[in-house]
Amino acid sequence: MKLSPDCVYIARHPVDGNEAPFEDYQRLAHKALDDLDLGLPDTGDLALKPNATVLYRPEKRIIVHPGFLAGMIESLTGRGIDPARIIVGDGQSGESPGKGHTWKIAGYDAIGERGAVLMPYNDTPVRDVVVDGGVVYDRYPIYTAVTESSYFFNIPLAKCHNLGCTTLSIKNLMGILGRPERHLCSTQVIDEPVGAEALMRLGDSGYSVFEERFYHKLCDLLVALRSLDIPRLTVVDGLIGRDGTAFNEGDNHPLGWSLVGVDEVSVDTVGTWLIGLDPLETPYLQFAAERQLGTIRIEEIDVVDVATGDKLSATELDALRRPTPLMPLSRARDGYYARFRADGSAVPWRISDVNEQREKDGLDPVPFELVSSAHLVED
């Protein structure tokens, strides 16, 4: 099947419960890629960028499962690609054996077993890439493993995040940035002139100025990536998703799908919809739409079943959507709160700090409710 840049493709694999064996992830990756004509180049490296920020055990669903990567690598080498051309890398926190965070514990030895190269991006060269019309950044340092590749695979997993709300294709791009710019979730040098108090005040969007800048930083990064003259593709590991903060606090849930697409905004819109959230209410997607980086209206996106080549109807797509959303959680003074209210609207991040600033400014607090701690799994 010829890959259309205007479509999002969905592959499905049955799954029960919140854990699955290596082989099921492997099979899902094959289902996602084997029948698509990717137009792979004859020369140059293929950069595979999974979400591998903190090297937890793969069954925790905090990083892309090594079985999914193994299936992708097999699908690529099955087309005649020399495995030595496949570079799997991420900019991440590095190994911490004392905390149980190593590449081996994460199961990424499966990469070397298939002949591909594992390249932690930290301390490797970067190239300055201009951000045309950047709102916060006018240029970004992007690892040359990405900028000099002949094809870029962005491989997120379907999970929630305390600040981004979802970690799908756009947020996963943070790992291609060199340091210190990579740390977009923190107050950075470029933010300091705004002032600590101003960053916690609500902007016109209803989110804090800090949040607004974060979402613009993500959009700036997407603009920078799209400016590179290399083909790219997002392939989402969505066999089992995760709610919560993106790290220890949260639970796993069966999803049973992978999404494949060229347009990152479209992929994230479909993924956000399928996990039960409203893309129109998801902050970073709102900013992407306002900057005309893509549509976030699910009805405007063609979702094609890889197995049949048929476009899914609205009814068929709705049947795949989780009735109970995977909910992103953020920390408050006395616990955690849901980032989305019952009506679907988003609650600002770091709500305690936002409300503390509002109290100083003589304004009413933004309402929110803590979630039951029984929902959280901390280990």
Image: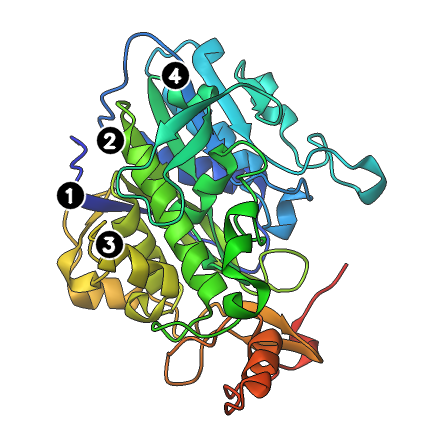
Q: Kindly check if marks 3 and 2 are in contact, taking CB atoms under 8 A apart as contact.
A: no
Q: Is residue 247 above or below residue 87?
A: below
Amino acid type assigned to the residue bearing label 1 in the image: Asp
Q: Reading the chain from its start, which is encountered first: label 1 or label 4? A: 1
Amino acid type assigned to the residue bearing label 4 in the image: Glu
The disc at residue 148 is 4
Judged from the image, the secondary structure of the residue bearing numbered disc 4 is loop
Q: Kindly check if marks 3 and 1 are in contact, taking CB atoms under 8 A apart as contact.
A: no
Q: Is residue 190 above or below residue 119?
A: below
Q: Nearer the viewer, mark 4 or mark 3?
A: 3
**In the rendered image, which residue does mark 2 sit on?**
36
Amino acid type assigned to the residue bearing label 2 in the image: Leu
The disc at residue 317 is none
Which residue is at 58% across, 38% downward?
52
The quadrant of the image that shows the C terminus is bottom right
Which residue is at 28% across, 50% downward?
265
**In the rendered image, which residue does mark 3 sit on?**
291
Q: Reading the chain from its start, which is encountered first: label 3 or label 2? A: 2
Q: Quadrant of residue 114?
A: top right
Gap in Å between the C-alphas at discs 2 and 1?
14 Å
Gap in Å between the C-alphas at discs 4 and 2?
24 Å
Q: Nearer the viewer, mark 4 or mark 2?
A: 4
Amino acid type assigned to the residue bearing label 3 in the image: Arg
Say whether residue 36 is visible: yes
